[in-house]
Structure formats: structure tokens, C-alpha cells
Image (tube, rainbow, N blue to C red):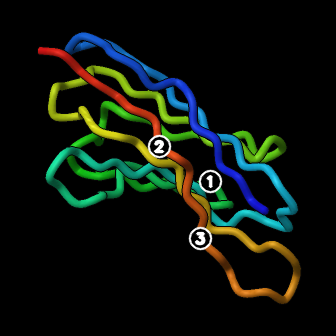
Amino acid sequence: QVQLVESGGGLVQAGGSLRLSCAASGSIFSINAMGWYRQAPGKQRELVARILIGGSTNYADSVWGRFTISSDNAKNTVYLQMNSLKPEDTAVYYCNADLWLRIGERKSTYWGQGTQVTVSS
């Protein structure tokens, strides 16, 4: 019912930039938070950045100062501006949303299909 669609991944050189987008669609009553996680080969999926409905954000220590998360609440869309990319940023990036489908229902978590980010050295 709810779909998260990521875009913006690709191949860049170290020091370059990418901007990821994720649009949530479906019968969404309200979104509590949206964020980005990433998973590199052989590693656990980890939080990259998250933005709450009130606008507060949190970042992984490894990306602080380089990545910026933002959102367009009217479009249920979250963005991740990634600057000064490093080879260690290479991973599949997954969009995440915590949301309510309807009033009175428990909050649910949804995931996008992932978009590949590859940073060459």
C-alpha cells in the first residue's frame, strides 16, 4: 500500500557529490520520520541520517558535516545531499519511513528498494 521510491544514486569520484531523493506514496495519514540507511557488502545496515516531523535531524558520526538530510513534507519526500563523498560511503542506500496509515493505528515502518551509491578512489 505504501511505496518508497529512491532515486539519485550513481557512481562518483571521491570528493564528489550526489543527492538522493525518496518519495513516499500511498494512503499515508502522517509521517513521523523519514531517513536513510545504508548497507555495504558484508556489513550490517546502518543509519545514515534521519529527520523527524518537527524537523530535527540526526546523523551517523561518519557522515556528520558532509551529508545533509532535508524533507518536503507536502510531497512526502526526503532528500540526502551527500558532499565530500568517500569510498567508504559506497553502499546501497535505503529510504526509511515511520508513518501512520490511518488515525488510531500503530506506527509502521516501510523501506524503499535501495539505490546504489558507488564512490571511486
**Circle 2 crowding by C-alpha within 10 Å: few under 14, some 14–19, many from 20:** many
Q: Are marks 1 and 2 in contact (CB under 8 Å)?
A: no
Q: Are marks 3 and 2 in contact (CB under 8 Å)?
A: no
Above or below 114: residue 67: above
Choose mark 3 or mark 2, whichever is in front: 2
The residue at 35%/40% (across/down) is 92
The residue at 34%/48% (across/down) is 38
Above or below 61: residue 70: above
Q: Earlier in the sequence, mark 1 or mark 2?
A: 1
| Numbered badge on residue 55 | 1
| Numbered badge on residue 114 | 2
Q: Position of residue 25 (x, y in %)?
A: 79, 50
Choose mark 1 or mark 3, whichever is in front: 3
Name the residue tied to disc 3: 109
Q: Position of residue 34 (x, y in %)?
A: 58, 55
Element type at mark 3: strand
Distance between the alpha carbons at the discs numbered 1 and 2: 23 Å
Q: Position of residue 83 (x, y in %)?
A: 35, 22
The amino acid pointed to by label 1 is Gly
